[in-house]
Image (cartoon, rainbow, N blue to C red):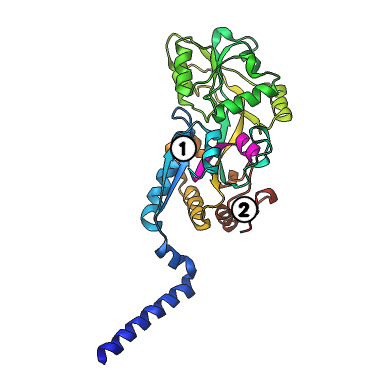
């Protein structure tokens, strides 16, 4: 009898403790205990640009901070870039991806590549860093010194299906050029660098956050002189007015690359962190929180990590926030523009 009463007492105490945790800590404390292992994948791009190291850095940061305590792990994969990343998100092959503003804008609005096929499950977490256009050509092919100089050249537009290719073609459209106006090659970043050094091509489209490893490789190589073409104000306005490209002025400081003695007036668009809308709100909240509360980690990963900061997190985002990210920003006191409020509610 004694042991039976004792058993009932112990069970009662467990139930009281359970109710106590619900009352004081809410369901989050209990759900955290019950959370099944969460394994996420973030898609980046080719290894020669900025997407890959930033993606690997974020995946590592999230796993370090969340694996033991929250049972959340994240891994990064390479890809052809923004176009493939959106396709993989739609197919639920990946959970997050780094995307160009251009691709995000087209996908959400159902324009350009996604004409009449909008991707309305796309959600955003944060602007990450500016995607800077590097139209690099060999010096002896320079005429005016601006982006129009690529016309007629053997020019690598970017790996087929990549964000580099799409942004390059979109910029060319804004400048009044067609794909056929260059002798197009479709190489990745280091493939383009090698082809330029071998003089198999005259130039390449290498858009990424500076310093771009492939551009550094070209400028540091003996036996080749290269330049980064500028964009005039008129060209920037034409690209913005005639296409979906969300461009703004960007100055590449002198000495960013070996032998680059003068600043370069080019253009850029935002890169942002995209996420599938069906991901758990609490998980995305934690991802957002960890990203912004460990700034030194991402700064150490890549120079572009310095742009990942709360004050610019919402800049240029082309699709609504994920509810988990929305919650974090509201708790931090940010004013959320109407176009970024999650349509499914919060």
Give the x, y percent position of residue 303.
Answer: 47, 34
Residue 85 vs residue 76, the one in the foreground: 85
Q: How many marks?
A: 2
Question: Which of the two residues, 270 or 116, is positioned nearer the viewer here?
Answer: 116
Q: Which of label 2 and label 1 is nearer to you?
A: 1
Q: Position of residue 89 (x, y in %)?
A: 53, 42
| Quadrant holding the N terminus | bottom left
Can the viewer see residue 302? no
- Residue under label 2: 334
The stretch of residues the image draws in magenta is: 95-107
Q: Is residue 343 above or below residue 198?
A: below
Residue of label 1 = 54
> Regarding mark 1 in the picture, which secondary structure is present there?
helix
Looking at the image, which residue is at 67% across and 19% down? 178
| Residue drawn at the location 54% of the way across and 38% of the way down | 87
Q: Position of residue 141 (x, y in %)?
A: 58, 8
- Which of the marked residues, 2 or 1, is nearer the chain's N terminus? 1
Image side of residue 230 versus residue 41, left or right? right
């Amino acid at each position: 009898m004694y042991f039976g009463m004792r058993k009932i007492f112990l069970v009662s105490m467990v139930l009281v403790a359970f109710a106590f945790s619900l009352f004081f800590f809410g369901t989050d404390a209990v759900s955290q205990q019950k959370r099944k292992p969460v394994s996420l994948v973030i898609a980046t791009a080719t290894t020669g640009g900025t997407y890959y190291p930033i993606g690997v850095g974020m995946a590592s940061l999230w796993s370090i901070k969340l694996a033991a305590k929250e049972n959340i792990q994240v891994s990064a994969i390479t890809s052809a870039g923004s176009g493939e990343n959106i396709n993989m998100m739609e197919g639920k092959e990946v959970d997050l991806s780094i995307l160009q503003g251009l691709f995000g804008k087209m996908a959400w609005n159902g324009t350009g590549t996604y004409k009449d096929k909008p991707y309305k499950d796309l959600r955003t977490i944060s602007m990450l860093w500016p995607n800077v256009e590097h139209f690099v050509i060999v010096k002896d092919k320079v005429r005016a010194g601006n982006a129009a100089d690529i016309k007629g050249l053997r020019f690598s537009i970017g790996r087929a299906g990549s964000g580099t290719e799409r942004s390059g073609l979109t910029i060319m459209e804004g400048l009044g050029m067609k794909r056929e106006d260059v002798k197009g090659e479709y190489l990745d970043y280091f493939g383009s660098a090698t082809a330029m050094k071998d003089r198999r091509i005259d130039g390449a489209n290498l858009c990424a956050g500076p310093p771009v490893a492939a551009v550094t490789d070209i400028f540091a190589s003996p036996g080749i002189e290269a330049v980064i073409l500028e964009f005039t104000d008129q060209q920037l306005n034409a690209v913005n007015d005639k296409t979906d490209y969300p461009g703004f002025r960007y100055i590449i400081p002198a000495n960013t690359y070996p032998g680059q003695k003068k600043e370069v007036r080019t253009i850029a668009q935002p890169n942002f962190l995209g996420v599938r809308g069906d991901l758990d709100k609490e998980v995305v909240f934690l991802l957002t929180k960890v990203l912004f509360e460990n700034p030194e980690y991402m700064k150490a990963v890549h120079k572009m990590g310095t742009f990942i900061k709360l004050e610019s997190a919402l800049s240029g985002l082309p699709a609504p926030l994920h509810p988990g990210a929305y919650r974090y920003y509201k708790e931090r006191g940010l004013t959320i523009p109407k176009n970024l409020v999650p349509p499914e509610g919060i």
